[in-house]
Amino acid sequence: MATFLYKLGRSAFRRRRLVALLWVALLAVAGIGAATAPVATSSSFSIPGTEAQRAFDLLEERFPGAGADGATARVVFKAPEGQKMTDPAHKAVVEETVAALRSGSDQIVSVTDPYTGQAVSQNGSTAYVSVAYKVNAMELTDETREALTQAGHNAQGKGLTVEVGGDALQTMPETGSGEIVGVVIAGIVLVLTFGSLVAAGLPLLTAIIGVGIGVSSITALANVLDLGSTTSTLAMMIGLAVGIDYALFIVSRYRAELAEGREKEDAAGRAVGTAGSAVVFAGLTVVIALVGLAVVNIPMLTKMGFAAAGTVVIAVLIALTLIPALLGFAGDKVIGRKQRKAAKAGAGDGAAESAKSEKPNGGTRWARFVIRRPVMVLLIGVLGLGAIALPAASLEMGLPDDGVKPTSTTERRAYDALSDGFGPGFNGPLLVVVDGDKATADRTVSTIKGLQGWAAVTPATPNKAGDAAMITVVPKDRPSSGATETLVHDIRNATGDDVLVTGATAMNIDFSQKMNDALVPYLALVVGLAFLLLTVVFRSVLVPLKAALGFLLSVVAALGAVVAVFQWGWLGSLFGVEQTGPIMSMMPIFMVGVVFGLAMDYEVFLVTRMREAYVHGERPGEAIVTGFKHSARVVTAAAVIMIAVFSGFIGMTDQMIKMIGFGLAVAVLFDAFVVRMAIVPAVLALLGHKAWWLPKWLDRVLPNVDVEGEGLAKGTPADGAPGSKPDLVKV
C-alpha cells in the first residue's frame, strides 16, 4: 500500500493544477445540486419491529386521513393572577385563536376547542388548544408554522400569557457561533504547531472543502433519500474533525521529509506513502464504526451513519490527493520562517542545526518518563478514568422532551405551564389503539383504570367501521420519567395482543429499548472488525487488544461525565444545561460508534510510528520514544483540534446536539491524553518485545499492507524520478 500511495502522492503533486481543478469542480457540482434540489418534504421516523410502530401502522390502516403520526402542537393560555380562563373576555380570545388556527393551514387535521374538549384546568387558570396535523413535523411548510406562531402572538397581546409547544415547532437546530469558534481554535493550534500560516491553512481549507462537498451532497439527496435534519449536522461535526486531523498528519510528515533533505515531490510522495497509509486505515475504522450503526435497524440512524461515513471517505481522498497538490502550490511557504532562514544559512551551520534537531522534545521527555515508571502511570490512568466512569452506573436513558429546552424558548414555557395547570403527564399522553369492537375497547378502558400511574383516561373513540378504537391515557408523571415507562409496560402486560400502546412517549421508550438491545451486538461487530483491521496494520495481537480495552475505558468514562453533567446537573450551568433529565437513548451506542473510530485514529498514527521504528531495528523502549518524538506533538494538536470542533456544538440550543458535542469532546480528551498518551506507552513498555508478537500461522495468513513504508525504505519505487533517494527513511 505504501508504494501505491507514494506514487499517488507524487502524481497529485506533479499534476496539482488538474487535481485542484477536479476537487473545485466537484465542490461546485455538489453546491449547485444542493441549491437546485427540491426542498426535503419528508423526514420520517420509524422503529421497525416495535409495538409503538405497529400501532402507528394500524392507525394508518383503520383511521385513514387522521394523521396518526402527524405533528402536534399545543397553544397554552394562562390567565393573569386572580382571573380565570372561563372569563368571557378570555374565552373570546381563545375562540378567536381556535378559528384562526383552523383557517390558517390546509395541513391541519383538527383543532380542539378547550371549552368543549375538557382542556381547562380545575382552578381555571390555564387552558390549551390541541392542534393535529396531517404530516410530520419536518413536512410542515413554513406558512403552516408561521400561522401557528402568529396565532399565539395575536393572543399574547390581549391580556393573556400564551406559549406554543409540541413537535410542530421542530426545525433544523440553530447553529450558533460555536462551530466557528471551534474552527478558529483549530486554526490557532495549527499555527502554533507548524509556525507557518500556509501550513496551518491547508488542513482548514481542505477540511472545509470536504465538509462542503459532503454536506452539499446530503442536502441535494435529502428529498430523495428521506434524510433527517440532524444528518448534515453529524456529517459536518465528524467531517470537520477528521478532515483537519488527516490533513494535519500528511502536512506534518511532509515537513519532516523536507527536513531530511528530500526534494519536494519525493517528500510529498513519501508523506502520502507513510502517513497516508495511517490515514487510510484510520479512516476505515471510522467508516466501519459509522456504517455499523445499520445493525441497530433504525432507518434514521442508519442514514446518519452512512452520510457521515461518506464525508469521512471524502476527507481521506482529499488528504491523499488534494493535500499533496496544494503542497506543490505552497512551495517553501509550508515551512516556518525560522526553518527557512536556517536553511538559507547554508551548510556551515549544519552541525549546530543537527545538534539542535537531536535535542529531546516534549514527546521524547514524556515517553522516557513513562518508560521509567510504567506501573505508576498505568495505575493513575486506569484509576482516574475508572473514578470518572462511576456515574455511568446510574445511567438513565430516554429521549429529551421540551422540558429540557432553555426557559427562553416558548416550547419550554408551554411545557411548564401545562405541568403547573394540569400535571406533568399532559405533556406526553399515551395513545392506546384497540384492534377490536366497542366492547373490547370498553374492557380495555376498565383494565387501564385498574392500574396505577395514570391521571386521566378518555372514553374509547371508535373508527367508522367500528373495528378499532383509540384511547388517550394521561400519565401522572412527566414523559421521560421512570414512572411513565412503568405505566406503559403495565398497560401492555395487562391487555392482550389486540391492544397496542403508542404516541411520542411510548415511541421514545421503545426506541430506548431497541438501542439497549442493539448495543452489545453492535459493540461486538465494530470492535471485532476493527480488531482484525488493526491486527493487519500492526501485525500484532496484543496491540489491537490493548487498543480496544483502552477505548472501552475512555468511552465509559465519557459516559460517566455525561451522566454527571446532564443527568445529575454537576457543572450544568457551565454547559448551558437548564434542566436535567435522562440521557439521550442513542448516546451510548452513538458514542461507541463515533468515538471508537476517532480513538483508533490516534492509535494508528501514534503506534504506527513506533512500529515503523521497531521494524527498522530499534528496541521496544527506543521505538516508543521514537514514536513519541515524531508523533506526540502532532497527535496532541490533532486531539485539541477535535476537542475544539466538538466543543463548538455544546453551544447549540438543541439538547441532543449539545449532549453529543459534550460527550464526543470529553471522550476524545480522555482517549487521546490519558489512554493513548499515557496508558498505551505504559502497557507497551511493560510488554516489551511481546507487544509485537504474532503467531507464525497468522503471520502467513495476514496480508502485508506495509503501513510503515518498509518498501519505500528499500528504495524509491518511482524509477528515474527526480529527487529519488535509495537510502533508508530515518525514523
Image (tube, grey):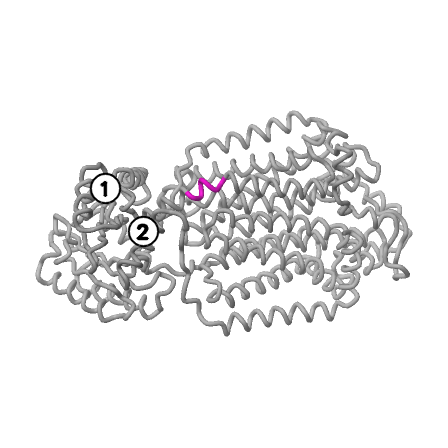
Q: Quadrant of residue 374?
A: top right
The residue beneath circle 1 is 476
Residue 14 visible? The answer is: yes
| Secondary structure type for disc 2 | helix
Identify the residue at image location x=40%, y=55%. Answer: 45
Question: Mark 2 vs mark 1: which is more N-terminal?
Answer: 2
Front of the two marks 2 and 1: 2
Identify the residue at image location x=70%, y=63%. Answer: 322
Q: CA distance from mark 2 to mark 1?
A: 22 Å
Q: Residue furthest left?
A: 88
Q: Which residues are drawn in magenta?
A: 514-519
* Residue 517 painted magenta: yes
What is the three-letter code of the residue carrying label 1? Lys
**Circles 2 and 1: CB atoms closer than 8 Å:** no
The front one of 347 and 269 is 269
Q: Residues within 10 Å of mark 2 (few under 14, many from 20)?
A: many
What is the three-letter code of the residue carrying label 2? Ala
* Residue 482 painted magenta: no
The residue beneath circle 2 is 55
Residue 103 image position (x, y, % from top left)? 22, 71
Residue 416 visible? The answer is: no
Residue 201 image position (x, y, % from top left)? 66, 60
| Secondary structure type for disc 1 | loop
